[in-house]
Each structure stands twice: as C-alpha cells, then as structure tokens.
Image: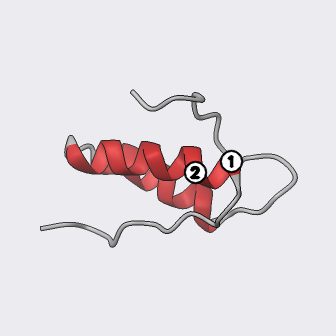
Amino acid sequence: MDPAPPVVARPGCLTCAIAARHEHHHRRTHDHSAAADGRGEIRNHPDDEPKLTLPGEPP
C-alpha cells in the first residue's frame, strides 16, 4: 500500500523537479521516509530557499 499519492512538480521549477525525482526514486525503492522529504519540499515550495538540502541528482 502506498502511503501517499505522488507529487506533481510545478512546471519549469528546478527545485520542484529535483524534489519530484528524489520522491519518485524513493517510492520505487520503498523508502517512504525519504519520499516524504521530497513531497514536503514541493508542498512547502515556493520559498526563497529550499527547506531541505537535496542533492542535485537523485540516487
């Protein structure tokens, strides 16, 4: 069972795109805690600075 629906990145937003890629990767590997970090980043965006420090490329 999936704990939450996947996120939808805002078109054209690099921060959202990176967070969505991380979220998608972690959903596939069943790391739901890490996936929640990506969802939280998108949900809390846009802000001046991202809330989390996500690497530029997903694992």
Name the spot of residue 35 as percent of width and height, x first: 38, 50
> Which residue is drawn at the image coordinates 87% and 52% (left, top)?
48
Name the spot of residue 50 as percent of width and height, x first: 73, 47
Q: For this view, does 36 lie left or right of residue 27?
A: right
Residue furthest to the bottom in view is 5
CB within 8 Å, label 2 to label 1: yes
Name the spot of residue 25 as percent of width and height, x first: 33, 42
User: What secondary structure is found at the residue carrying circle 1?
Assistant: helix
> Which residue is drawn at the image coordinates 54% and 48% (left, top)?
19
> Which residue is drawn at the image coordinates 58% and 34% (left, top)?
54
Q: Amino acid at mark 2?
A: Ala
Label number found at residue 14? 1
> Which residue is drawn at the image coordinates 60% and 61% (left, top)?
42
Neighbor class of circle 2 (other Cα within 10 Å; few <14, some 14-19, many 20+) is: some
Residue furthest to the front in view is 12
Q: Which residue is mark 2?
A: 17
User: What secondary structure is found at the residue carrying circle 2?
Assistant: helix
The CA span between labels 2 and 1 is: 5 Å
Name the spot of residue 6 as percent of width and height, x first: 37, 66
